[in-house]
Structure formats: C-alpha cells, structure tokens
C-alpha cells in the first residue's frame, strides 16, 4: 500500500536546484511531490505494484542522471515522460517474458486504428515526423480533444476514467476518440506518411 | 511491434502539451471538487431535513413539552376546541393536527386522560396542588349539620415514599369529620349540592311532576329539574353554584342519572353531563356546547322506587404506599371498600378518646356495633371479649394468615368466634394468599346471615365449614342474594350432617 507523503513540498525550481546541487534530497523531494502522479502513469501501463515501484525507482535514478545537464522547463512533464518510457520498456520486457498483466493494455490496441503504415522505413525520421504531427494536432485541437487524447494515449487512462474526469458520458469520450483518430489519420496522409 | 513503437512516439509530444494537459486537469479537478462540495452540501441538507422530519417530535415545542410530561401547553391548545374532552373524536383530530404523528402515537401510550385533565383540574392531583410538599389532599363533603365525611383523596403522583394517612378531626371548613367514605371505585354516589337530594323517591318524583305541571317525564329537562330542587326559578339558574359545588367536591363529570320509577320501571335519563354543569358555570369555559334536553328512556327492569344520582370523579389517588392510618376521635364509620386500596397498611392508630373505634389485638373493631372492621393478624385468632357480632366487608383484605394446620402443608384454619351472627358481603375478598393454599373457615352455629362472596376476589381456595345440618343452614342462615340458590353443598365427614360448601366457579 502506498503511503501518502506528508510535509511541505518544494517548488519545481527548488527541486531542480537540488538536483543541480547534487543533493540526494532532490530524489526524496521529487518522490514526495510526484510519487502519486508518477505511480498513476506507471500503473496505467503495468498494472502491477511491484513493477510500478521498480519503475519509479528507475525514474528517480534516470532523473538524477539527467539533471544536470538537462534543466526541464516543466518537471512534471519531464518526469512523466521518463516514467512512461520506463514503464513501456518494462512492459516490453514483461511481454517478451509472457508475464504481462492479465489486464489488457487497451490504448496499445487502439493506436493500431490510426497507425501510419508502413511504419518501419526510416525509424528516426518517421518517429520525429509522427511526434511533430501529433504535437501540432494537439496544439490546434480543442482543450477537450487534447485532454482526451493525452489522457488515453499518454497517461493510459481508461475511457470511464476520462469521462469521470471530464464530467461527461463515456459515449461522448468514445465519439471524441473516434474523431481524433480520424483526424490524425488524415494528418498523416497529408504529411505523406502512408497509412 | 509497430504499435508499441508508435505508442512510444506519442510519449515524445511536447512538454507544452503536457503542461496544458495538467492545467486542464487541475481545472477539472477543481470543478470536480466544487461539484463534490455542492453535492456534499445538498446531501447534508437532505440529511438534515430527513433528521429534522424524523426528530420532529423531539423539537416540536408542544411535543417536547408533552414528552417531558408537561401537558399544559398541549392542554391549553386543546381547550380551545369546543366540546373538548380527551376521548372525543374532535379532540383526537385536533391533537393529531397539533402534533406530528410520532408524538401523537407516543401520547396515546401515556395516561393521556389524566395527563390532560390534571392541568385543568389541579385539585385532582395536578402539580400545583402539591406545592406545599404534602403527598396527598383530602376532600370532605359536608352533611349540612356541622359534620362531614372524608369523601375523596388525591395523591401526588410524584411522591414515591411511604404514606401515613392522617385524618383530621375537622375539615378546613370546620365540619367535624365523622366518616371516612373513601371508595375504591371512581364513582361516588353523592349529591353535587347540599340542596339537591341524593335519592328521589317515587313520591318525590310525583311531587316534582305536579310542580312542573307535566305528567310526562319525557318532557322534563334539566333546567326544570334543577330549578325545582334548588328552589329557584328557571330563569335564575346561573353559575353561582359552581364554586360552592367544586369546593365541596372535585366533580369532573356528572354521571348518569337513573330514575327508578315504580310504574315505568327503570328510567335512565341520558346526556346528564349537562344537567348541572350548565347551570353551575362550566359552560362559561366552553366545556359544553349547549344545554341538552334530558331525554327519558323507559327501560324494563327492577322496580326500585328511587332516583339515584351518580357523580363521576377522576380517581387520582394512589394509596398503595400507605403504611399507616391515623384516625381521630370524631370518626364513627369507615367505608370498608377502601382497605384493598392499601395493601401495605400495617398500622392503624386510633385516638384513645374515640368511643366507637379501637384497635384490639390487631383487629380494628367498632365497639358500638360489635363489628370487626379489619383483621391485621396472621395467626387466625380473634380478640377475646370483643363481643363481635359482625364481620364487615373486606375485613380480611389485609390479613396475613399463614398455614397453621399441623401435618398439612398449605392449609389454613380460621375459626370464627362463636358470637358472630352476620358476615357481610365480600368479607373474605382480597385475601392476599397463595393460590396453592386452602383456607378452611369454620363458621359458628350462631350465624344468621352470610353475605355474597365473589370467588374471583379470593387468592386462595376457600372452604366453609358449618357445624349444623343442611336443614339448619337453610332454615337459620340467610344467604347473600347473589348466590341465593346457586351455591354448592358438600357434606363433610367430621360431623353427623354438617355442611361444607364451595362457591361456584364462574
């Protein structure tokens, strides 16, 4: 069971300063402030407390190693990305070991619906292009669509969870997701990425 | 694996997007919290309303007072009802309007009658009447000749201690107390006014009919009757008698008036509660709506040439804690039916100057009539040389007889004195004994009258032994009318032809 950390929390800048000062307290402060948040990010992918804990430890280690030299503008996003990537790494590993949680990782299946195809010609170029298109799309998208897409495909929330957070029906979220997928597919086609 | 790779690419979205996401997430969280707070408030409000409704009886001022036993506020509102009586339909309806259902239901489980009546009639035992700390009040009825009788008693319902009933020699008005007439029933048959006759004979009724110049009793109304007896014209009847009447006697309700007419049989005059109360001022309090005509209903029945007025009073006396009774020198007679009201009575103290009543060896005796009034012994013996002739009603109601027959468990032998000639009705009623006991009562040969006994009032089984023969019993002893020809004879084996009898089971 996770224990909620108590006590005053530092600002992101103060935490980053601790990292730069190479003070180990930076990790503790990070954990105090973002533990629950990062736990949710990892848990939505791994669905296993032990794996999530290990993933969080790896997140803090990687953050320790990344700051410095990096100075993240938005620490929360920075941490979320690390946690997410590490969680996906672990998911891949577990998947290879056939030890994936019984809970289906549904967002992974959903991306198939608007996945550019072929998607293995020039990995790095194509990845960069896809990331740019998605970012651009989310930049232009309404708050609700941005929120739904990010919740679903970045933070791996379920549709009922998203609906609850938005205070709307699940069917509305599903409709919005379908529209987002359709628009992204069109964007990929416009950018010459074959679907 | 393409989808996994693509999924990773999604993780590369710009931090600005994530920052925007988090801003919106926080905004949504705030909205959710606000909505939750509103819901909590609404839930709390709903709960409060629910609790308020459920607890209405507790917060309702009248209900609260009623639950606390203070019925004054409730009674005050009820008195506004025309024709208010606790048991009347409109009163019940009004009560249900005044109070929430819960409290009404609770009230029905309380002695609401007494509770509602007491504040209105403090003389009947309301709290106000016991401010001086005395546990009881005595009410006397004047006989109009300088003497009076102790007619009624009210006890403080809050008083829990032992009661020592001290009867004074004189009433507050100065009348000498010569009788104690406390009865065990709520009905006291007395005239409500000194000028109003207690018993009307058939000849009086005839005079009354002539005076009223009306030969038909059905045409009689309360006004005419009252005016006749009070020697007043009908027009002069007013409320001035109310106070004198209420001073003399705490009347709450005038009961039925029965006219036993020799020619027409028993006649009941109904709706008589308005009979005197109307003319005694009660209507000023809107107690009754109007004067009801006295309706005569001829009924077939026994011919008794008298008219009996009965008055109902609230029975608010609780004498169960009475342990001692102090009787002054002036008292000459005591109503025997009060003994069962005092099961814990142990001591009777009689003024040494009382020439009529005295305590002799644990027995209360009327020396003038040779009557045993009360037997307080436990050994079955009687005072010697008392010259007892009569055993009064309820004489053994407080006896503590114990089994006294050698070799026989649960057997009690009571040998009545040889001088006894009369045993009054219900003499052995209220024998406080085990149902497993059998009491053998040996009657004297001198007996000439044996009163009726109600078997249901006996705790133990009673067997009466008569030393004579059946023929002697039949010829010498008059039996109580209630069991005349209806008792069972059983022959005993210890005499040539004695009589042993049991009273029939009902």
Image (cartoon, coloured by chain):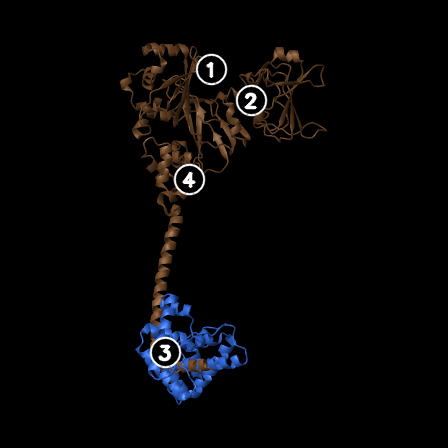
Marks 3, 1 in one chain: no
In 3D space, how far apart are the residues under numbered discs 3 and 1 (Cα atoms)?
111 Å
Judged from the image, the secondary structure of the residue bearing numbered disc 1 is loop
Q: Is residue A114 above or below residue B466?
A: below
Label annotation for residue B107: 4
* Disc sitting over residue A185 in the figure: 3
Residue with the mark numbered 1 = B301
> Residue B140 is drawn in which quadrant?
top left
Instruction: Return the mark for residue B426.
Output: 2
**Colour of the chain lettered B:** brown
Q: Nearer the viewer, residue B252 or A22?
A: A22
Image quarter hosting the C terminus of chain B: top right
Residue at disc 2, secondary structure: loop
The reply to whether dot 2 and dot 3 touch (C-beta < 8 Å) is: no
For label 3, the SS is: helix
Q: Chain of mark 2?
A: B
What is the crowding at mark 2: few (fewer than 14 residues within 10 Å), some, or many (at least 20)?
many
Dots 2 and 3 on the same chain: no
Question: Horizontal placement of A187 versus B352: left or right?
Answer: left
Q: Is B488 placed left or right of B34 in the picture?
A: right
Q: Position of residue B496 (x, y in %)?
A: 72, 14
């Amino acid at each position: 069971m996770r224990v909620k950390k108590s006590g005053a929390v530092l600002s992101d800048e103060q935490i980053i300063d601790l990292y730069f000062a190479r003070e180990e307290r930076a990790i503790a402060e990070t954990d105090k402030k973002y533990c629950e948040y990062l736990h949710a990010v990892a848990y939505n992918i791994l669905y296993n407390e032990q794996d999530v804990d290990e993933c969080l430890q790896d997140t803090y280690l990687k953050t320790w190693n990344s700051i410095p030299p990096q100075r993240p503008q938005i620490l929360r996003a920075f941490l979320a990305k690390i946690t997410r990537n590490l969680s996906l790494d672990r998911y891949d590993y577990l998947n290879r070991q056939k030890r994936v949680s019984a809970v289906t990782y549904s967002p992974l299946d959903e991306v198939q619906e608007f996945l550019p195809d072929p998607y293995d010609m020039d990995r790095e170029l194509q990845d960069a292009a896809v990331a740019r298109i998605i970012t651009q799309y989310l930049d232009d998208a309404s708050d609700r669509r941005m929120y739904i897409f990010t919740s679903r495909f970045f933070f791996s929330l379920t549709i009922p969870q998203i609906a609850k957070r938005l205070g709307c029906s699940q069917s509305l979220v599903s409709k919005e997701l379908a529209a987002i997928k359709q628009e992204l597919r069109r964007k990929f086609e416009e950018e010459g990425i074959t679907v | 694996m393409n989808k996994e790779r693509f999924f990773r690419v999604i993780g590369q979205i710009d931090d600005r997007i994530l920052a925007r996401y988090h801003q919106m997430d926080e905004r949504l969280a705030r909205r959710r919290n606000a909505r939750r707070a509103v819901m909590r408030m609404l839930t709390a409000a709903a709960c409060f309303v629910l609790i308020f409704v459920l607890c209405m009886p507790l917060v309702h001022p009248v209900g609260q007072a009623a639950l606390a036993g203070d019925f004054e506020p409730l009674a005050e509102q009820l008195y506004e009802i025309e024709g208010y009586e606790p048991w009347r339909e409109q009163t019940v309806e009004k009560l249900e309007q005044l109070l929430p259902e819960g409290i009404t239901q609770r009230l029905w489980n309380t002695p609401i009658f007494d509770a509602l009546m007491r504040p209105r009639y403090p003389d009947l035992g309301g709290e106000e009447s016991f401010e001086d700390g005395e546990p009881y009040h005595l009410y006397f009825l004047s006989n109009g000749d300088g003497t009076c009788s102790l007619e009624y008693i009210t006890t403080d319902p809050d008083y829990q201690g032992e009661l020592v009933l001290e009867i004074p020699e004189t009433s507050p008005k100065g009348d000498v107390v010569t009788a104690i007439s406390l009865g065990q029933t709520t009905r006291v048959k007395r005239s409500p006014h000194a000028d109003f006759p207690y018993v009307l004979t058939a000849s009086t009724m005839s005079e009354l009919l002539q005076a009223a110049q009306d030969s038909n009793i059905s045409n009689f109304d309360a006004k005419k009757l009252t005016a006749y007896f009070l020697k007043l014209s009908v027009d002069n009847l007013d409320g001035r008698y109310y106070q004198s009447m209420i001073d003399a006697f705490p009347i709450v309700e005038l009961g039925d008036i029965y006219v036993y007419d020799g020619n027409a049989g028993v006649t009941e005059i109904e709706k008589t509660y308005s009979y005197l109360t109307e003319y005694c001022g009660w209507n000023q309090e809107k107690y009754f709506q109007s004067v009801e005509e006295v309706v005569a209903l001829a009924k077939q029945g026994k011919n008794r040439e008298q008219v009996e007025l009965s008055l109902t009073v609230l029975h608010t006396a609780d004498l169960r804690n009475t342990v001692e009774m102090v009787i002054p020198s002036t008292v000459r007679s005591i109503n025997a039916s009060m003994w069962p009201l005092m099961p814990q009575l142990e001591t009777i103290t009689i003024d040494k100057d009382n020439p009529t009543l005295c305590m002799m060896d644990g027995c209360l005796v009327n020396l003038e009539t040779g009557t045993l009034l009360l037997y307080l012994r436990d050994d079955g013996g009687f005072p010697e040389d008392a010259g007892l002739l009569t055993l009064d009603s309820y004489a053994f109601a407080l006896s503590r007889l114990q089994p006294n027959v050698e070799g026989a468990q649960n057997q009690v032998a009571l040998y009545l004195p040889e001088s006894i000639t009369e045993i009054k009705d219900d003499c052995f009623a209220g024998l406080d004994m085990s149902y497993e006991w059998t009491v053998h009562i040996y009657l004297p040969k001198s007996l000439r009258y044996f009163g009726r006994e109600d078997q249901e009032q006996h705790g133990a089984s009673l067997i009466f032994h008569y030393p004579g023969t059946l023929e002697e019993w039949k010829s010498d002893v008059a039996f109580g009318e209630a069991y005349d020809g209806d008792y069972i004879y059983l022959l005993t084996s210890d005499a040539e032809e004695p009589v042993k009898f049991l009273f029939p089971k009902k």
